[in-house]
Image (cartoon, rainbow, N blue to C red):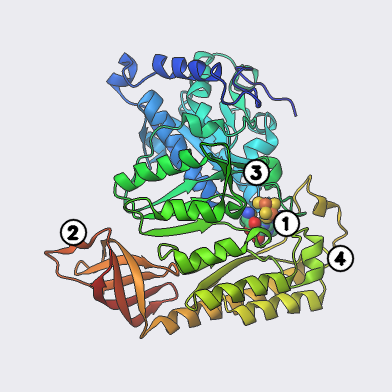
Amino acid sequence: MSVTVFNPRINDAAGAKTTATAPAVIALTESSSAQSPVDKVAPKKVFVTTQGCQMNVYDSGKMLDVLGDSHGMEVTHNIDEADVLLMNTCSIREKAQEKVFSELGRWRKLKEKRPDLVIGVGGCVASQEGDNIQKRAPYVDMVFGPQTLHRLPELYDQSNEQRDIAPKNRIGTIDVSFPSIEKFDFLPEPRVEGYKAFVSIMEGCSKYCSFCVVPYTRGEELSRPLDDVLAEIDSLAAQGIREINLLGQNVNGYRGEKDDGSICRFAELLHYVSHVDGVERIRYTTSHPLEFTDDIIDAYAQLPELVSHLHLPVQSGSNAILAAMKRNHTIDVYINQINKLKAIRPDIHLSSDFIIGFPGETDQDFQDTLNLAKELNFDHSYSFIYSKRPGTPAAELPDDVSFTTKKARLAEFQKVIIDSTLAKTHEMVGTTTRVLVEQIANRHPDCLIGTADNTRTVMFPYDENKMNELLGKIVSVRITDFVSPHMVKGELIEVLA
Ligand code: SAH
Ligand code: F3S
């Protein structure tokens, strides 16, 4: 894959944090700031569509932030009034990848009508395909990866300056490099809405599960330094955020550098975050069983801010399949971790990811997965049919399971998961649960709405004149009624924080 990069200094992976990099970016940012006469006349509008995981949701927010900060661009949710269209893509499964090109086909029609439209493709498909994106979709102006989204302002300027040249012949409009952790150094102060926020603590993944494309599209695991993470959380908390969701492909593999050069592991980070004034609730997504260590389990005894919900993907209930997936742990290890956690937090809610129909999955392997799901009684889970990803080791494995069998297994598996989701919600009735109050219910203006530890939406009536006082508070609610698989109703018991 050959990739055109506009500034070799900026693309210097080793020199990501060198002083040579910073002035180049700052200079460009200043020259195209919101103060320019063009922007004063009419701010450009940017539209972004996001596919895939929460990391992508976080990254899309940052794309809007950098273009707002550098070019005064405004966000629009109406594609017809947008000047810039951004697609943040996902390549985790083939279907997601194909969606990119069908959606781009629709955007091409828009650009035929409005040739000034600037189209950018970011995320994991961009990272994997690089300049191939423009071979299939020559009207795409900019291509950038998950680790270069902070360079969007320059890519945008370059594509504007070379407007008369066909996109594929332009220079400096593609950058899918992995410039270390530089991205975070160039993101503007986070802006927030509501009471919950994601904070990315690491990029990439080095686990190389045999089926997964992430290490190739997002690069190797790289942790943000501790102080950077805490500074972002301080800023969010000062703006009223009460719940922090620490993000990364394997957050429990976090190894952030401290000021003194020593390394902060994930459990220690949890302690630091819990001490930030204003942070009342901590979630994290996602962790890997391999590094779900005892110090993290102990944190559940010490930190009431940690929600009683753990998303710990297991992928399969069969040791043979886990080995073929290169997950590097057994089912016993997983069950043991869950049992230890349950001993500390009997009310812990669990969720997981599963891949059904991995190459070589026998009927017995599948039964083992079904049995694990029944035994652990997950609150909810994500399950997908295995999708062969080019370039991953599993793509070379002989796959003797027919697609019809895979589909039948998935349907059977999902029924078990849906049944336990439903049962878990019903079980909430009569219990008391912690809720972060987030908004006034649209269709029930006499009620407030929030989220419980186990991610269920909780609605409860409250005095209409005093509702604002409760927004952003952590309260305890006694659940009285089942509303839907993910929603319950209750009554306020007390305000906790
Ligand atoms: N880092 C996370 C997972 C990231 S990918 C972890 O360790 O769990 C999110 C989920 O997508 C995975 O947990 C897996 O269940 C699913 N997935 C990844 N690659 C896949 C593939 N090739 N086919 C089907 N599902 C896949
Ligand atoms: Fe993918 Fe495995 Fe990492 S699922 S994101 S390679 S932990």
- Whether the residues at callouts 1 and 4 have beta carbons within 8 Å, the answer is no
Query: Relative to 193, is 46 above or below?
Result: above
Amino acid type at circle 4 is Asp
Q: Is mark 1 within 8 Å of ligand 1?
A: yes
Secondary structure at badge 4 equals loop
Residue matched to label 4: 400
Residue shown at the point (74%, 79%) measured from the top left: 367
Count of numbered circles on the image: 4
Mark 1–mark 4 Cα distance, whole angstroms, equals: 14 Å
Residue at horizontal 47 percent and vertical 34 percent from the top: 85
Around disc 1, counting alpha carbons within 10 Å, would you say few (fewer than 14), some (14 to 19), or many (20 or more)?
some
Looking at the rendering, in which quadrant would you find the C terminus? Answer: bottom left
Give the side of residue 237 with respect to residue 271, left or right: left
The mark closer to the camera, 2 or 4, is 2
Which badge, 1 or 4, comes first in the chain's sequence? 1
The tag on residue 387 is 1
Q: Quadrant of the N terminus?
A: top right
Label 2 vs label 4: CA separation? 59 Å
Specify the quadrant of the image occupied by residue 463: bottom left
Position of 35 compared to 304: left or right?
A: left
Labelled disc at residue 221: 3
Q: Residue 176 in the image: x percent, y percent? A: 63, 31
Q: Residues within 10 Å of mark 4 (few under 14, many from 20)?
A: few
Q: CA separation, marks 2 and 1?
A: 47 Å
